[in-house]
Amino acid sequence: MKKTTRTLSAHKHVALVAHDNCKSELLRWVKENKEILQQHFLYATGTTGSMLSKETGLAIKSKISGPMGGDQQIGAMIAECKIDVLIFFWDPLNSVPHDPDVKALLRIASVWNIPVATNRASAKFIFHSPLINEEVDIEIPDYQDYLADRT
């Protein structure tokens, strides 16, 4: 598939997602990185967004709860180039009923080539990179070319 370039602005659109037993870890990470995060546009699945906003005072646009379709809403935003970075603290040792949605979210983030953090260490690397506050070009699928090839 052909690729095209997308420019991520200096003020990133960041999605924050966490499985239930990882929410406290995400909250701790968000508190530790509040100064950096407040420079960006934040989105989250419902329960996570409500908790983070209440506990930190950050402005977060919440979607519906993950198991009710929030993971898919975030995935759709990624496919529409409306999310630049995905922070998804997930528990690889604990299966959840919406595991297919989780896998789909991680897959679509990979398809659209956005940075993804799945734990504190990877989130730290992303948010302490100088690129987090700079314009960055990334390659993404050339969707128009894709459609032309299919018709």
Image: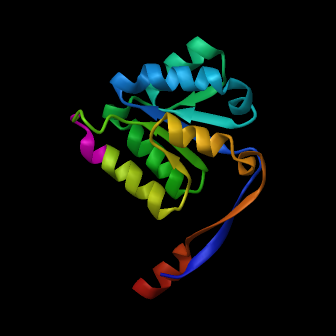
Q: Position of residue 44 (x, y in %)?
A: 51, 32
Tally of numbered discs: 0
Question: Can residue 122 be seen in the rendering of this structure?
Answer: yes
Direction from residue 136 to residue 97 in the image, left or right: left
Above or below, comparing residue 96 to residue 100 in the picture: above
Q: Nearer the viewer, residue 129 or 8?
A: 129
Q: Nearer the viewer, residue 144 or 104?
A: 104
Q: Nearer the viewer, residue 121 or 49?
A: 121
Q: Position of residue 75 (x, y in %)?
A: 45, 49
Q: Position of residue 71 (x, y in %)?
A: 40, 40
Direction from residue 50 to residue 40 in the image, left or right: right
- Direction top: furthest residue: 55
Q: Position of residue 61 (x, y in %)?
A: 59, 30
Q: Which residues lie in the magenta part?
A: 96-101
Q: Residue at x 66, y 27 (%)?
A: 33
Above or below, comparing residue 114 to residue 141 in the picture: above
Asked if the magenta segment contains residue 57, the reply would be: no
Direction from residue 25 to residue 29 in the image, left or right: right
- Which coloring applies here? rainbow
Location of the C terminus by quadrant is bottom left
Question: Can residue 47 be seen in the rendering of this structure?
Answer: no
Q: Residue at x 78, y 51 (%)?
A: 134
Q: Residue at x 53, y 82 (%)?
A: 2
Where residue 138 sits, quadrant-wise, is bottom right
